[in-house]
Image (spheres, helix red, strand yellow):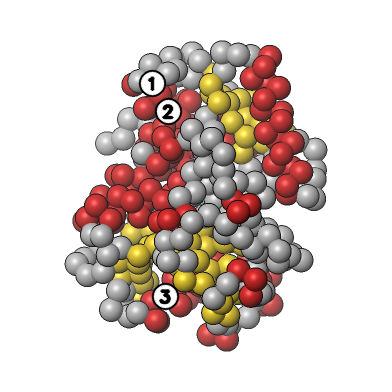
Amino acid sequence: MDDHISETIGRPDLVTLDDGLVCLRFETMKVVSALAAVRHLLRTGAVRPGDTLLDSSSGIYAYGLALACHRFGLRCHIVGSTTIDRTLRVQLAVLGATLEQMEPCADLKLDQSRRVRRVKEVLHANPGYHWMRQYHDSIHYLGYRAVADLIAKEVGPGDLTLVGGVGSGASTGALATFLREYSPTTALVGVQPFGSVTFGSEGVVDPEIIIAGIGSSIPFGNVDHSLYDTVHWTGFEAALAGSVDLLRRHAVFAGLSTGAAYLAARWEHARAPERQVVFVAADSGHRYVDSVFARHAEAPAVEDLAPLEVGALSELAMPWSRMEWRRGGAPPRAVHEGAG
Ligand SMILES: Cc1ncc(COP(=O)(O)O)c(C=O)c1O
């Protein structure tokens, strides 16, 4: 029996889709990370009940932090981007979290740097607030240990490949780190949108939209590039094809970053059928009804898509590219100074 709904929501399920292809399905992934991070801050005395936790978020981290604050009797203040929809806005209000939503802004880089600037202003005015720094503070890795334990227990013997979208880098980075304690042969495959600095695709513009929750226009301290064996970059349309196919073929209703991860996972599974491939489904499909699922008729068949294999970042091209990262370092524009 759970003590609080955040524990229930943060616990994923493992679903076998095909022989050797497994979906790690979360209702809202960031809940597991926020809960363990806040528990750690309370344990170490960095924050106390009644304190206010602050962060900037484009969506699901805000929800995770609000639930963790509700669970532990803390206050929550979010500087949110325009991607926070009405469903979340209303829930945050009822949960007692305060939200400042920034003006609409088509430029992701401007939106991210504006939010960071606003967080610093809020901290200046309220020095007692604790800034969670989900993109940089490694306490966001902690919650994934229990998830890695679950994967190790449920996914049978044999070599494992983990595939997941990279936003802050905490989920894929942590899961690979902890799974490699069980088996050092665990391979990690990161999935990115085009136009993101994290793995050096900023030179390729996706005319549709960036995939919510993955990629970045600024460097993140929580991304440890040396953990990744392979990287896939998918455009919006390829991710849409993955999301629609995942629902049609396997009845899993999940978001756009999941569609991209599923596409990459299918590819990796076909290349190395002897390995168990587990891909991360970070959120459900509800936020994507109009932008993705209502457009199912225009989704290309996943069998008709294949990544361009590239040997250097200068060769990246839409709609889908793949590169052996070989646990290499961060590209120059993704180096974060002073991760904490
Ligand atoms: C829908 C979705 N998928 C994937 C991710 C990536 O997770 P992480 O930040 O742990 O890299 C996020 C992060 O916000 C997300 O919202």
Q: Nearer the viewer, residue 265 or 336?
A: 336
Q: Secondary structure at mark 3?
A: helix
Q: What is the C-alpha distance between the residues marked 2 and 3?
A: 35 Å
Name which residue lies at 19% across and 67% down: 157
> What label sits on residue 313 in the rendered view?
none
On screen, residue 263 above or below 99: below
Disc on the earlier residue, 2 or 3: 2
* Contact, mark 1 vs mark 2 (Cβ under 8 Å): yes
Name which residue lies at 74% across and 36% down: 114
Question: In the image, what residue type sits under mark 1?
Answer: Leu
Q: What is the C-alpha distance between the residues marked 1 and 3?
A: 40 Å
> What label sits on residue 268 in the rendered view?
3
**Residue 125 percent coordinates (x, y):** 68, 14
Question: In the image, what residue type sits under mark 2?
Answer: Val
On screen, residue 339 above or below 73: below
Q: Is residue 182 left or right of residue 106?
A: left
Q: Secondary structure at mark 2?
A: helix
Q: Nearer the viewer, residue 150 or 85?
A: 150
**Residue 282 percent coordinates (x, y):** 48, 53
Q: What is the C-alpha distance between the residues marked 1 and 2?
A: 6 Å
On screen, residue 132 above or below 136: above
Circle 1 residue: 42
| Count of all numbered marks drawn on residues in the image | 3
Instruction: Sort mark 2 into few (<14), some (14-19) or many (20+) by Cα contacts within 10 Å.
Output: many
On screen, residue 41 above or below 327: above
Q: Secondary structure at mark 1?
A: helix
Circle 2 residue: 38
